[in-house]
Structure formats: C-alpha cells, structure tokens
Image: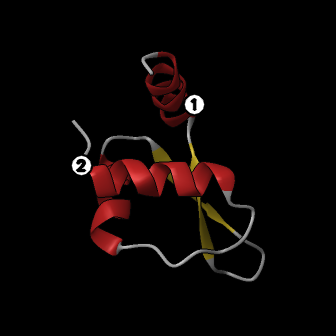
Amino acid sequence: MLSPHEFATLMLLKDSAEQIDLDRADLEALLERQLVTLEKLASGEQRPLVTINGHSLLRAAARSR
C-alpha cells in the first residue's frame, strides 16, 4: 500500500512535464514498487517516469472514486 505522500508523488510525476522537487524517500518507495523508473537524459541527469504499473495503479484509483 502506498502512503498518501507516495501516491501524491506518483500523481505529480504523471502530470508534470517539468522537473519537480521530490521527496527522495517517496521516490525510492515508488522505484522499489516498480511504479517509477529513472530515465537517463543526454545531460547525464536522471528523470523519473511513471511505468505501466504506475499508470495502471492510477487508473484503478480513479475508477474506485
């Protein structure tokens, strides 16, 4: 189960095209659950991206509303 902060982080990542300031612990939890992956940019920096599993979880949460 995701904490409210982890779930909010996942939602922010899905909706944000820009670099956002993330809580490292929340990001690590999402990485462990394979809901987010890190994409390596040409600049050498990494950008978090929501995985298929992450999108599925968000869709399921939206349906349960």
Q: Position of residue 57 (x, y in %)?
A: 45, 28
Which amino acid does the dot numbered 2 rest on?
Answer: Ser
Report the residue at 31% width, 58% height from top: 5
Which amino acid does the dot numbered 1 rest on?
Answer: Ile
Distance of mark 1 from mark 2, alpha carbons?
20 Å
**Residue occupied by mark 2:** 3
**Residue occupied by mark 1:** 52
Q: Position of residue 28 (x, y in %)?
A: 32, 61
Q: Is residue 25 left or right of residue 19?
A: left
Mark on residue 19?
A: none
Return the residue nearer the eye: 32 or 57. 57
Q: Quadrant of the N terminus?
A: top left
Disc 1: CA contacts within 10 A as few (<14), some (14-19) or many (>=20): few
Location of residue 25 with respect to 51 vertically, above or below: below
Q: Position of residue 22 (x, y in %)?
A: 45, 73
Report the residue at 72% width, 70% height from top: 18
Location of residue 13 with respect to 54 vertically, above or below: below
